[in-house]
Amino acid sequence: MIGIIGAMIEETEPILAKLEKVNTTRIGGNYYHEGIYASKKVTLAYSRIGKVNAAVTAAILIERFKAERILFSGVAGAINANLKIGDLIYATRLVQHDVDITAFGHPLGFIPETGDFFQTDPRLNEIAEIVAKERGVKLGKGVIATGDQFIADQAKKEWIAKNYNADAVEMEGAAVACVCASFGAPFFVLRSISDAADMDAGFNFDEFLKSSAKISADLALDMVAKL
Ligand code: ADE
């Protein structure tokens, strides 16, 4: 079974609309939609926003629904100036930008017995590249930084760029990565840019959330068909 997570209704809805034979369960306040896409069994989860919600959702998908791999689909703020609204990026590595135990001599983002950067699954990344090429869609890749903050500030954005060499920022990916790494489940994080994490971010996010979420959902579904 393939687990798919979206953090907002706008992120899950375009995927849910394409699932067949849907059976929905509510666990811990989140919704899990079991269904079929391209003859593949999938469970689409609506996690709600943030690292804690995303972590619980990933754990439930793996333990209760027996997800063998997890795809995340949604939107992100661009840190890398080459990324424009609507562009797609998948994570090669993810890090929690709001983890700080530097007081004990650890690097920013690092947690003992957990690490800092989580590597995504090379096979899933390769499938994304193949699907994007087939569809003639431009697909970027790079570091995605995750934290429980909506970044809408140039100084904070530059701080994340400098400390983590991040290309995009969002609020769930590294939490899903951390859980999947702990459980040994391959994972993949796909995001379409909704804003540039700057002073206009809130305004741009509201305007482009739906269209960018759909761009990500479409590629994620094409990947499912290939798995
Ligand atoms: N998701 C989309 N845009 C974001 C931003 N600017 N900060 C955090 N998460 C986001």
Image: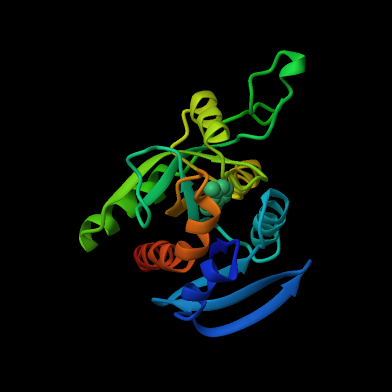
Q: Quadrant of residue 5?
A: bottom right
Q: In this view, does 108 lie above or below 126?
A: above
115 left or right of 138?
right
**Residue 217 location, x and y as percent?**
43, 66
Q: In this view, does 53 lie above or below 9?
A: above
Which residue occupies 46% across, 28% down?
Answer: 165
Q: In which quarter of the image is residue 109?
A: top right
**Residue 78 location, x and y as percent?**
44, 44
101 left or right of 167?
right
Residue farthest top in this picture: 105
Which residue occupies 55% across, 54% down?
Answer: 202
Foreground residue among 128 and 109: 109
**How many marks overall?**
0
Foreground residue among 139 and 2: 139
Which residue occupies 58% across, 44% down?
Answer: 151
Q: Is residue 134 above or below residue 146?
A: below
Which residue occupies 38% across, 68% down?
Answer: 218
103 left or right of 61?
right
Residue 185 visible, this orientation: no
Q: Which quadrant is the C terminus positioned in?
A: bottom left
**Residue 2 location, x and y as percent?**
51, 64
* Colouring used for the render: rainbow
**Residue 175 location, x and y as percent?**
64, 46
Residue farthest bottom in this picture: 21
Q: Is residue 117 above or below residue 125?
A: above
Residue 137 visible, this orientation: yes
